[in-house]
């Protein structure tokens, strides 16, 4: 019995000692020097060739911390959203946009001590043209007639056709064409089969170590961090010496990891997880310091219509479906009220509120819609404020009262739910009602499948369910169709009637809409069954839209006309309703301040905070060590 | 001996048939998946940048050539078998051009280690408790144990795992909740690495053990309950043979045969991974790999994992079949 007691005591003692062991989260690296970021699980952990398939959109830190290119746009906007990185000034085009000259920065070095020069840029373009299948090969092949470097700091592109947006291939919003290290790749026989391991770095961090199983990668501050474009912007050495991209498991595990201070930056969790953290963990920061806490990404979740399928090719039907939606209920059902609404065809993020939403409020308020029997003004500028009021009881101290702050948090306005107007519009389109069921002009019941991706994006799945319920309550038999991993494929081939997804993404920090709009031109539209190129998945075709796109192509990127043209596009979207814009994609990214402070926020939007955004590097070098952090 | 050889040959024929049928079905299912790996790669490359539709079309063609997804189904089927016999499943399409074998060989040790250990622990504990509960049917302690084990049995793995994760990862944070070993620790046969692997594997293993014990317990208890009423057991008891001897030599031993079969089958299933547990604890095993492959439309990877699993189960069944006549003379040869 004594022995049993001794064993029991030893077991209890060892269990009590376990928490101390558990706190040693990273071997060999002081916790207060490491920023831990939610990363992916990478199956190709040994693969560091971001220019070849398999590494093209890597989110394990390599793209975010070691690559660089000519220009950057901060998706959060602001006066200094544009950054000249490897270039010393913005692109210089000739008058008809057939040549682009780039002036390069001096004093930038690869992490192995080799200086970056114009040769690297020329090599990047030529190598990708010579090797179809590399990430930017097709874009360069289509655009570049020749490339020359008259001196060490200058590169001149001669283009095959006028292209005022050619520089956007080298402009980072999320990613861009990264510069290849010529001195490494020129020794390689096949750049598509080269794993580039270990990678040399052109930015402030370099690979320290990685898990061959792909669960983590650790990046270390370069000793010569000053010899990088981001280093040149710093007046002192970054406090973050190591950046750990760690796969952190399921959402519950992510929340627990952060509560245990083992995960500083979460990429995205469900609203409920965010609310729980913000209520219980005062050491947590967020993009907005108050409800809804979320960061609105420059993407625009919408109700997409397949415009090649009847009756969605009818504008009146699309408007009727929009007016049957009570957006407040959708916002509550999908985001628990934490939504940033948008009635316009761009997300209300970055510079869009100033450029588009504020100037267009009067036009929206006065916009008239003919229902066939009368004219209505469907816009309600107070809807976002109403939404804020609906969640105020739950978050009494967390909802701003200032109208500008409310608009930044919840959006501006949206369409009033107007069942009578929707009825008139459907009747105008030849629909009839049999009992409570709407019948199509051919006499068959009006049924709609609402496609959602499912668990991968739960908020949008919930939005789809809420909208389907509202349509059903008003006589349209709507069912939710969960596409799962086939979602992208089905959107591309047009195998849907309606879907909750986004086909609009913007620069965020720049009013130019070419980022998505250029691909909307009608000559790119494929028949249903064939794969539609990214963006215009609703296959919207309109000569007025083509004219706007053609006009935009002739404008300089920074021309004041860009905004006016953008407003014309937005008016056309309202009139035609080719998709029903719903809200920004709100991302819930809690940030632990136990070890690090100075995260970007709506108040100080100096960088993106999402770990997958290459722009996050500006956040990482700006973070400051919390002097009150636990000592190692 | 001749009879045994004929028996083995027949069973080997069955083994080959099972493997060919299983792998062929897996090939067909994987290839009929609506998720196209080329489109998945394209969406990764194009989803975050300004993308010219003409570029996308050119890239699509290049990727189809690169991935070798252009040939007919028959051509791909024979190419697949020619690779399988060489132990090569080609490049992964979601982690191109990393070979599928490389990816599988990294995940497999984690899964084999975790599942083998958890299966054996669950088998030993479940059968031992089940045998005791079946033999000492009136024991109060064993009734309580039985209630506890049977209460655990119907709880879904997801709930058990999540409960353990919250209890030991948050409320009383004594164990790591994500990954296979400590970050930045060099893998190897070092004390630090081995203890780290054990620490990180504890919660996933505990989940599997808690869920697995019930089945073994219930089946063993009912087997023993039947055997204790058999004539030879009653005779031994009446003959004054000690309870311990009756339990171990007359009852438990006879009840073991189907349980050993079950154990072999379970060990064969180890190669399929424990998808839910690996997902909950972000464990770097083969189950998680397979789910990632399915979502990415990476049929090379899915086929690689499935083929491993099919062959492993078939080998386990084959080994049981040929071992049976040696340990149980009642199995007829020939």
Image: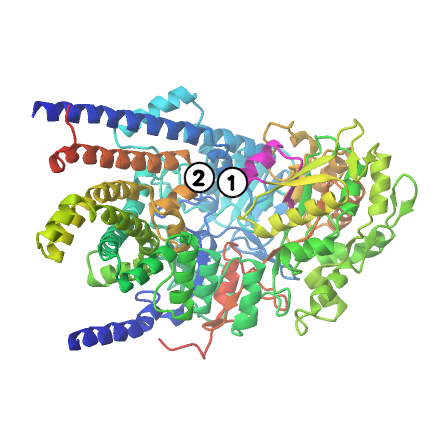
Residue A391 quadrant = bottom right
Residue A351 quadrant = bottom right
Residue farthest to the bottom, as pictured: A628
Residue B198 as seen in the image, left or right of residue A355: left
Residue to which mark 2 is pinned: B294
Picture coordinates of residue B94, whole percent (x, y): 42, 39
B224 or A604, nearer to the observer: B224
Residue A494 forms part of the magenta stretch: yes
The kind of secondary structure element at disc 1 is helix
| Residue A241 visible somewhere in the drawing | no
Residue A570 forms part of the magenta stretch: no
Picture coordinates of residue A17, whole percent (x, y): 29, 74
Badge 1: how crowded within 10 Å, few (<14), some, or many (20+)? many
The kind of secondary structure element at disc 2 is helix
Give the letter of the chain under mark 1.
A
Q: Specify start and end residues of the magenta stretch as a single range.
A: A482-505
| Residue A462 visible somewhere in the drawing | yes
Residue A79 as seen in the image, left or right of residue A84: right
Q: Residue at x 30, y 26 (%)?
A: B20
């Amino acid at each position: 019995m004594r022995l049993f007691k001794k064993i029991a005591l030893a077991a209890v003692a060892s269990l009590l000692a376990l928490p101390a062991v558990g706190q040693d989260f990273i071997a060999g690296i002081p916790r207060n020097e490491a920023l831990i970021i939610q990363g992916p699980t990478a199956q190709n952990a040994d693969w560091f060739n971001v220019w070849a398939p398999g590494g093209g959109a890597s989110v394990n830190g390599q793209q975010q911390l070691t690559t660089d290119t000519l220009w950057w746009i901060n998706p959060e906007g602001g006066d200094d959203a544009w950054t000249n990185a490897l270039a010393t000034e913005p692109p210089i085009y000739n008058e008809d946009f057939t040549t682009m000259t780039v002036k390069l920065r001096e004093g930038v070095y690869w992490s192995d001590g080799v200086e970056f020069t114009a040769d690297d840029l020329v090599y990047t373009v030529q190598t990708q043209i010579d090797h179809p299948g590399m990430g930017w090969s097709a874009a360069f092949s289509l655009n570049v007639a020749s490339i020359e470097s008259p001196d060490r700091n200058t590169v001149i592109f001669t283009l095959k056709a006028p292209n005022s947006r050619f520089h956007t291939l080298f402009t980072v919003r999320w990613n861009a064409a990264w510069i290849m290290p010529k001195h490494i790749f020129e020794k390689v026989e096949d750049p598509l089969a080269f794993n580039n391991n270990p990678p040399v770095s052109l930015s402030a961090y370099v690979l320290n170590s990685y898990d061959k199983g792909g669960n983590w990668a650790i990046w270390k501050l370069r000793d010569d961090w000053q010899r990088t474009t981001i280093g040149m912007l710093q007046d002192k050495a970054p406090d973050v010496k190591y950046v750990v991209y760690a796969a952190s498991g399921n959402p519950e595990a992510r929340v627990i990891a952060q509560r245990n201070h083992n995960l500083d930056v979460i990429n995205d969790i469900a609203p409920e997880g965010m609310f729980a953290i913000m209520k219980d963990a005062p050491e947590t920061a967020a993009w907005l310091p108050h409800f809804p806490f979320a960061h609105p990404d420059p993407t625009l979740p919408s109700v997409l219509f397949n415009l090649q399928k009847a009756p969605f090719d009818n504008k009146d039907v699309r408007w009727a479906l929009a007016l049957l939606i009570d957006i407040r209920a959708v916002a509550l059902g999908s985001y628990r009220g934490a939504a940033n609404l948008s009635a316009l065809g761009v997300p209300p993020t970055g510079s869009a509120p100033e450029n588009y939403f504020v100037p267009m409020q009067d036009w929206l308020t006065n916009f008239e819609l003919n229902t066939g029997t009368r004219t209505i003004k469907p816009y309600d500028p107070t809807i976002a404020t109403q939404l804020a009021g609906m969640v105020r009881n739950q978050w009494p101290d967390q909802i701003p009262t200032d109208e500008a702050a409310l608009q930044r948090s919840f959006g501006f306005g949206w369409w009033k739910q107007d069942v009578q107007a929707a009825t008139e519009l459907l009747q105008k389109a030849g629909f009839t009602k049999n009992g409570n069921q709407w019948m199509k002009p051919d006499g068959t019941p009006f049924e709609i499948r609402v496609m959602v991706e499912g668990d991968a994006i739960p908020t949008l799945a919930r939005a789809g369910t809420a909208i389907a319920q509202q349509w059903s309550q008003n006589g349209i038999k709507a069912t939710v169709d969960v596409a799962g991993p086939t979602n992208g494929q089905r959107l591309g081939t047009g195998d849907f009637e309606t879907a909750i997804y986004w086909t609009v993404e913007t620069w965020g920090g720049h009013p130019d809409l070419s980022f998505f709009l250029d691909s909307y031109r009608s000559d790119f539209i494929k028949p249903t069954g064939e794969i539609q190129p990214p963006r215009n998945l609703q296959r919207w075709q309109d000569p007025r839209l083509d004219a706007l796109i053609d006009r935009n192509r002739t404008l300089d990127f920074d021309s004041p006309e860009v905004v006016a043209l953008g407003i014309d596009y937005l008016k056309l979207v309202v009139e035609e309703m080719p998709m029903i814009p719903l809200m920004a994609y709100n991302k819930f990214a809690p940030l632990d301040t136990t070890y690090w402070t100075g995260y970007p926020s709506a108040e100080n939007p100096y960088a993106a905070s999402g770990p997958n955004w290459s722009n996050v590097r500006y956040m990482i070098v700006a973070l400051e060590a919390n002097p009150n952090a636990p000592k190692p | 001996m001749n009879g045994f050889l004929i028996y083995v040959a027949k069973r080997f024929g069955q083994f080959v048939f099972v493997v060919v049928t299983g792998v062929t079905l897996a090939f067909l299912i994987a290839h009929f998946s609506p998720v196209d790996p080329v489109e998945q790669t394209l969406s990764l490359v194009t989803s975050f940048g300004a993308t010219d539709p003409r570029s996308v079309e050119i890239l699509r063609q290049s990727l189809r050539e690169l991935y070798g997804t252009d040939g007919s189904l028959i051509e791909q089927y024979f190419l697949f078998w020619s690779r399988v016999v060489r132990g090569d499943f080609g490049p992964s399409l979601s982690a191109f051009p990393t070979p599928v074998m490389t990816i599988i060989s990294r995940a497999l040790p984690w899964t084999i280690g975790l599942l083998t250990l958890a299966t054996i622990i669950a088998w030993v504990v479940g059968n031992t408790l089940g045998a005791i509960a079946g033999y000492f049917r009136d024991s109060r302690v064993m009734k309580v144990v039985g209630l506890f084990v049977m209460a655990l049995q119907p709880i879904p793995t997801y709930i058990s795992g999540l409960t353990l994760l919250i209890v030991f990862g948050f409320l009383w944070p004594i164990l790591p909740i994500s990954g296979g070993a400590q970050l930045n620790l060099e893998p190897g046969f070092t004390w630090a690495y081995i203890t780290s692997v054990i620490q990180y594997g504890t919660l996933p293993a505990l989940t599997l053990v808690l869920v697995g014990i019930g089945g073994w317990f219930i089946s063993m208890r009912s087997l023993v309950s039947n055997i204790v009423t058999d004539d030879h057991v009653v005779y031994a008891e009446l003959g004054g043979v000690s309870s311990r001897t009756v339990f171990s030599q007359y009852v438990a031993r006879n009840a073991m045969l189907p349980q050993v079969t079950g154990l072999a089958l379970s060990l064969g299933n180890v190669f399929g991974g424990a998808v839910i547990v690996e997902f909950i604890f972000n464990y770097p095993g083969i189950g998680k790999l397979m789910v990632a492959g399915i979502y990415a439309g990476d049929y090379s990877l899915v086929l690689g994992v499935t083929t491993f699993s099919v062959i492993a189960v078939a080998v386990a069944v084959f080994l049981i079949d040929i071992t049976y006549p040696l340990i149980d003379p009642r199995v007829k040869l020939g």
